[in-house]
Image: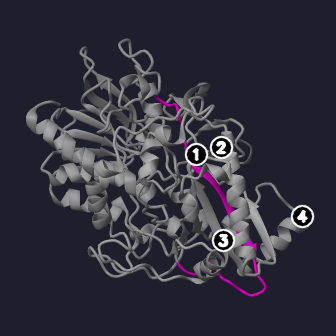
Amino acid sequence: MANKYDLTDDSVVVVIGSGAGGGMVGTELALKGIDVVMLEAGGRHEIDDFQNDEWGSFGQISWLDKRTTSGNWRIAKDFAGLPSWIVKAVGGSTIHWAGASLRFQDHEWKALTNYGAVAGANLLDWPITGKDLAPWYDKAENRMGVTRTNGIPGLPGNNNFKVFEAGAKKMGYTECHTGNMAINSEPRDGRGACQQIGFCFQGCKSGAKWSTLYSEIPKGEASGKLEVRPNSQVLRIEHDKTGKVTGVVYADKDGNQHLQKARVVCVAGNSIESPRLLLNSASSMFSDGLANSSGQVGKNYMRHMTGSIYAIFDKPVHMYRGTTMAGIIQDESRHDPSRGFVGGYEMETLSIGLPFMAAFLDPGAWGREFSTAMDGYDRMAGMWLVGEDMPQEQNGVTLHATEKDQFGLPVPNVHFDDHPNDIAMRNHAYKQGAAVYDAVGAVRTMPTPPYPSTHNLGTNRMSAKARDGVVNQWGQTHDIDNLFISDGSQFTTGAAENPTLTIVALAMRQADYIAKQMGKGSI
């Protein structure tokens, strides 16, 4: 099929990636009347293509390109070739996400100010505040149909939540409910209400969960101003002698390379591929990679402090019946250094199917301890722990010295060392999470190690000063006016909350800024 926009058309905005950031910024620009070419490395799978099968879906939509891993995190041992669990398809990880949509707390925007200079951490205050983003949070929540906002009722609590809630009350926790979820609790935006099928991580077969694939991108396409090119993996970004970016080189599904000219480029390839692309775009003018005068491209990688607690009870729970995640305890998300760490964490209900449970409960384990736990699967309740991890300069993405991908480019190496603050927080969370279940009669509780990363943040961080980061408050690179970062890699710090709502709010805000700057001829 012929391209809507010519490869030589240098008036278009090229958006690289179609997930929460790319899909939203591209759609918003198109709705504002701006011509957009969206390049997505993966294929396009519609709702009918989704598979309610964990391993089948994993193979269908996951980003499985070669990566290497290093550092002291357990993932380097358990999943050395899979440091992150993200999607390579139109819609990006909005296909795979669970729907949790939480605003940052006010103190989290100013982590350096509020936490102080934490030894070994590369903390920095965001150049924006919660007040700056509040109107965009409002717009994002309304657009995504987030429950418990805009008069939208919460989702019903399944058995997993009922056990969780009962334990929370016994513990004296007061901030417990079924969450702020971008999953329709009632018909909205042309999509029906959640059918409680489960398999939220495998793509929502009913379309109740918000995803750029079917909630946003079709709106942009209907405007006549958005062209999506699936199976188009970007290899490098090109620039002219002044340093202005002029286009991107990408490979199609057959491996043929094309140069798409551009007026503006927005990079939204996730926190691993986005810095990798900037580094692989090095030139004689930008010898350390594009937008990297600070040396911060690829650094300060965050993936949240994570872990899980599963508990076995005497009677069946059937935690897998209903949404994958719809329950939260927020009492521990406060900043309270008396607990032995800065920042806080959320407890969120989580269920995974039997195949994934066998893979993730204790990777590499076998024997009676493991088999008896699996025997109790129908009597399990589960929660995920997610908290603020510390940015560290040595954590990040670099280009591998020898390993190459299918296009002959260096693959990314993802390095991560847990900070002592992360470890202290995880140990506290394991203790409190187990106590929640013990309070309601669990016969066994099992802390489980972190999964491959789903919250990938930092690596192109936002900063007030060019020397401290990669982009300014608009996600515009400090070095190149017409080059933007539109995904979670622009996060200065990670906060305790699931990041998607903030990514979407920032993308909507960025699209507004780009449109105004293009109107003025500034970019």
Question: How far apart in space, not on screen, are marks 4 and 3 (Cα)?
Answer: 22 Å
Asked whether 77 or 173 is in front, the reply is 173
Q: Nearer the viewer, mark 2 or mark 1?
A: 2
Three-letter code for the amino acid on which mark 4 is drawn: Gly
Q: Which residues are magenta?
A: 297-322
Query: Which residue is disc 1 drawn over?
Result: 389
Q: Nearer the viewer, mark 3 or mark 1?
A: 1
Crowd around label 3: few <14 · some 14–19 · many ≥20 (10 Å)? many
Q: Does 302 lie within the magenta span? A: yes
Question: How far apart in space, not on screen, are marks 4 and 2 (Cα)?
Answer: 33 Å
Query: Which residue is disc 3 drawn over?
Result: 382
Q: Are marks 2 and 1 in contact (CB under 8 Å)?
A: yes
Query: Which residue is disc 2 drawn over?
Result: 421
Q: Position of residue 253 (x, y in %)?
A: 41, 44
Three-letter code for the amino acid on which mark 3 is drawn: Gly
Q: Are marks 1 and 4 in contact (CB under 8 Å)?
A: no
Q: Position of residue 124 (x, y in %)?
A: 47, 35
Query: Which residue is disc 4 drawn over?
Result: 367
Question: How far apart in space, not on screen, are marks 3 and 1 (Cα)?
Answer: 22 Å
Q: Nearer the viewer, mark 4 or mark 3?
A: 3
Q: Position of residue 4 (x, y in %)?
A: 19, 47
Q: Nearer the viewer, mark 2 or mark 3?
A: 2
Question: How far apart in space, not on screen, are marks 2 and 1 (Cα)?
Answer: 7 Å
Q: Secondary structure at mark 4?
A: loop
Q: Secondary structure at mark 3?
A: strand
Residue at the (70%, 47%) spot, across then down? 423
Q: Earlier in the sequence, mark 2 or mark 1?
A: 1
